[in-house]
Amino acid sequence: MVDQPDRVPDPQTPRTVRGSIVGGRVLNRRDILRLGVSLAGLAAVNALLAACGGDDDDDSPTATSVSGAATATSAPANTPEAAATATPAPQGQGSAILVNPGEAPDGVGGELRVALAFDATSLDPIATYTLNNGRWQENVFSGLVWRDTNLVVYDGKDGRPAPSEGFGLAESWEYTDDLTLVFKLRPGITFHNGEPFNAETVRAHFQRMHDPATASPQAFNYTSIKEVIATDDLTATMIFNEVDPVMISKLAGYGGFMTPAEASKDTTKFGPVEAAGTGPYRITEYVKDDHITLEAWDGYWGPRKPHIQKIIYRIIPDDNTRLSEFLAGSIDVLTLSPVQADAAKGAAGVQVVPIGVPTVSGLRLDASKPPTDNKLVRQAIAHAIDMPTIIETILSGYAKEVGIWQSEFSFGYEDIAPYAYDPEAAKAKLAEAGVATPVAVTFDVIGGDTVAREMANAMKDMLDAVGFNVTLNQKDAANYYNEYIAGDGGNIVPFGWGGWTLDYDNTYFSMMHTGQTYNPSYSNPEVDALLDEQRGTLDQAKRLEIAKQLNALLFEDAIDVCLYQNIYLWGVNNRVRNFSIPPDERLFWLDAWIQS
Amino acid sequence: MASTTPEQALQIGAQPKRQFRYRLAGRFLREPSAVFAGVVLAVLVLAAVAAPLLAPYNPNATDLRARNIPPAWQRAGSSAHWLGTDPVGRDILSRIIYGARVSLSVGLIVTALAAMIGVLVGLLAGYYEGWIDEVVMRLADLFLAFPFILLAITIIAVLGSGLTNLILVLVITGWVQYARLVRGLVYSIKRNQYVEAALVAGAVDRRVILRHILPNTLAPVVVLATLQVAFVLLTESALNFLGLGVNPTIPTWGSMVNEGRLYIYNAWWVITFPGVAIMLAVLSINMLGDWLRDVFDPTLRVV
Amino acid sequence: MTRYIIRRLLYSIIVLFGVTLLVFFTLRLSGDPVQLLLREGNPTPEDIEALREALRLDRPLYQQYFSFIGNAVTGDFGKSLRYKTPAFNEVMSRMPATITLAVAAYLFALLVAIPTGILSAVRRGGFTDFASRLVSLAGLSIPSFWLGLMLILVFGVKLKWLPVSGRGEGFAGRLEALVLPAVSLGMIYAGTLTRLLRSSMLEVLNTDYIRTARSKGLQERLVLTRHALRNALIPVVTLAGLQIGFLLGGAVVIEVVFSWPGVGRLVVDSINNRDYPVVQAAVTILAVVLIASSLIVDILYSVIDPRIRYS
């Protein structure tokens, strides 16, 4: 494992607020794009990585050294000082885990098979918005800006590599004023279909994205762009409606992936079954619900060429079948559920690599319906559930308990001890609340999610033991989501939130501020005032002060309890060499190779 | 025309009753599949009825510290849990015993309701023909042409998942087969001489249907019913697989099999024992159905 | 006969109309797709309303229904909310996979059912009957996903004889990939077919012409294959026609377990995302296939077996 020490600040903004919903078969918790990823750029997961232990020995599975992951404590330098005053919000940094390091032999060859849980639904990068697609898109498409698997943006500032050292399509850029950004493009680049890449491409790309007829789910990220002018063949001038300090990061991927001007005019062809980019791999086949095949493109302009000849992304919806394919050796790379880790670890020739992510999961308590409108009842719930044991058993230790809805990488995070597991204290709280026991509460469960069912069963027993009477309501993922948003969910709703912007504003504003879509039930004027106040200032010290007040208020209010930060598990066949696992799921295969 | 009165016809049917019963027992014992099915079903029904007495533990009591314990005969097993424990530490044997109660009663309730509706509708359609027949048969075609899964998802999405709604889904689609079967039977029975005789003798419709037609449809209906109980058990597990099962606190064999799915490589017992329970039950019920059909009429085609 | 066919066609249209009505309104009851489409963002109520308007889901239900019917007649089922491509094309693109699997599963079912059905009938009541029915019933008695998982575990992971899932590459690869899902799906039908063949064989064996054939001293094997089986297969063929419809729509679980890109999976994914146009298209198309196949079977049946008359 290689830990990338470089920590690079990156502009962030509260407007990058996004979340993910923990889901079952449809809204898989890994699969919904945490908007933060597309915007935030530099996500940090250092602390968990540090706990992963450095073990370069190929023969000993990485996973063996990972048991301590859940106890990682060292937080990254997400201090206000780390953020330049010019940037409105602080930022994090991340580092990838390099699996089976080693230089590739000469030439290109081999076949890599990666499992996807969901169909791409479209090959047009601006037509979709899921992390699932992030696993292949970077290999086919390129943005103007390059961000590597350590989440470092190559902008040439503060000691970071210059744009020309990366794989972005712009050689350099410059703000001529706050609202004008001029890109110098790399010359001589063509798309896989032979179309040239030039300033007209950039103009047409954003014009297409903003065309209401395109209905791009990415468009709202780029609303600050008023227009793009093709000043000359290799000079694209971006004019903004408003100052957008995060634009450079946003151009590194997703909606920023450049699409060919001519081909993309035909929406029946570009997207549904074929698409051309400028990346090291081109799409040679896409069969919906089955597979996407990429092949090394000999016309790639980059300073390094791909080593793997063919990459097949197979769409395998069933968790168990994905694991079986991995154990049979017919899938090389996949993500595993924590409950599958044991089965996968025992297999020969594979590794299970945990990597921490800033997603936090927990229970949302509905403050608008009885009995959870009573703070004491909410605190009783928090005390009644034995989270350390649940994490250790059901999640196989692959999670870290937190006291507030912030990952430890988030600006504003505090190491607040969660409500301790204490059945007596829970009973006392219920007595103090003066409610008649058993207290009836409803608890939503997503039907297709085995782990969610297990946790719900265990939690029900713990709650019933202190005087609750829990009714588990199983719902399908779509209803679970729709009912939650409408405020018709249960007293207790299990929930997950990405938090990839690594700033407390992301989570707290969307989930705690009155009237937000993701906050159907909680309203605290004090919290609202603090959240509004921090949005009006660029003073990070002040924002941190506000974060601390919010943390204390929200902890006391116990709206979200039993929280834990997630850890993803990547299964990697040892055929795959020199594979850098990024913390944001955006796999980039240029430097990896296949051992024959 | 009629050479016997309806009453005479019935008496003819009733005469060898005792002899028939005796022969039935004899045939049962002579057929290995019937004995096998009978023994298995007796055990399962006993488990269902006496679940609280037989089950060593509360089927829903979780114990995270005792999760995924292997069955007693395995090295890491414990005699405290004969068939081991599931991923939240519930005793698998207790859940299978209680699961028999839930799964078998769901199967029986669905079958009883579907058969009642289907037989009634089929009798009316077959007896009166005309517009009732047309409406019923088009409705049956509609349900046959409509994907069951979609109906299941919709009902569960609208009404929520629970045993009642699961039963509702299965009954809504289950009656069709009975209706079609009974209608076809009534068509031919109606043309039998004794029915025509009864009508000529001035018997009212209700009497003809209940006394003369219904009894003659029962044998194939019973055979179809045995097959449907089996179908319900399997469908319940498929719905669980698709995330449309019952609430997690209700132990059913189908939900247990589904809960063990992710552990097939490291805790095989979680999926295997409830799976074997389903398999034995379905196999036995099918065999019983086959045997009943052979007894009634070996060439009876009920699929 | 012509009048019969015309009447059946008329009925089919009524049933089809009923199917569209049922699918349209049950879907509307099952939940709102607009919020789900925007779940990845952080939509404001205005965003949600704007999208609802853009998708024309703000119109009164009866208007939506009539425009759905009006367009469906011309084969236009609207655009998939998820794929943004014509819903009809999405369904049809999954058809080859589904049909391949259905046909393979049926062939497997026949392969099991014909010998076991004959054996059961000939040695009725004996141990052979018991054993052969046990075999054919065993597959029918296992939850299909469990059977699929076990087959994957044994033949895909442990023995590595066959691919775990997917459609495979090249002709041989495709055939190999077809084996496990076809067996898993076919098992369900093998039991049914065995049972049907057994009873129809018993019926045929009791007929006069078989007795005559036997009394003439014909070899038992010839009696069975030449005379009995041929006649006993008629109802089996009938059932085959009817079951094809179920095979097309009912393979969801097998398609998920074996990552098979078929219509069943598309329907379930589309329901889960409340992708109305795709579900409507798939249900209507499947209903057409089903109704058509049962009509064709009925007509063929009357051709094969002249005893059957339609009034």
Image (tube, rainbow, N blue to C red):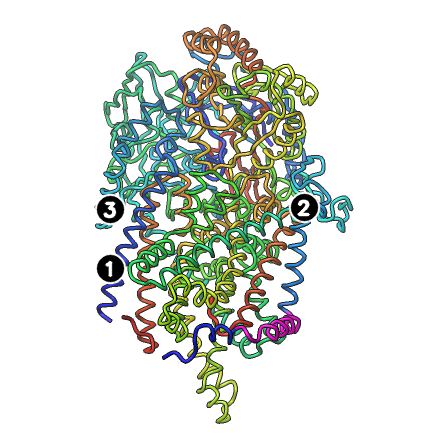
> Above or below — where is C266 with respect to A384?
below
Residue type, label 1: Leu
Chain to which mark 1 belongs: C
Query: Position of B188 compared to A46: left or right?
Result: left
In the rendered structure, are the residues bearing label 2 and label 3 in contact, judged by CB atoms less than 8 Å apart? Answer: no
Residue type, label 2: Ile
Please tell me which residue lies in front, C261 or B161. Answer: B161
Which quarter of the figure has residue C301? Answer: bottom left
Let me know if marks 1 and 2 both belong to one chain. Answer: no
Per the picture, the main secondary structure of the magenta-coloured stretch is helix
Q: Nearer the viewer, mark 1 or mark 2?
A: 1
Q: Is residue A159 visible?
A: no
In the rendered structure, are the residues bearing label 1 and label 3 in contact, judged by CB atoms less than 8 Å apart? Answer: no
Chain to which mark 2 belongs: B
List the single residue furthest toward the bottom. Answer: C216
Q: Is residue C116 visible?
A: yes
SS under mark 3: helix
In the rendered structure, are the residues bearing label 1 and label 2 in contact, judged by CB atoms less than 8 Å apart? Answer: no
List the single residue furthest toward the front. Answer: B202
Residue occupied by mark 1? C10
Please tell me which residue lies in front, B238 or A359. Answer: B238
Chain to which mark 3 belongs: C
Q: Residues within 10 Å of mark 2 (few under 14, many from 20)?
A: many
Residue occupied by mark 3? C69
SS under mark 2: helix
Q: What whole-number distance in Å separates the C-alpha atoms at marks 2 and 3?
A: 51 Å
Residue occupied by mark 2? B92
| Residue C257 falls inside the magenta stretch | no
Where does residue A251 sit, x and y in percent of width and height?
Answer: 37, 25
> Which range of residues does the magenta coloring cover?
B14-32
- Seen at 56% across and 37% down, the residue is A570
Please tell me which residue lies in front, B43 or C258. Answer: B43
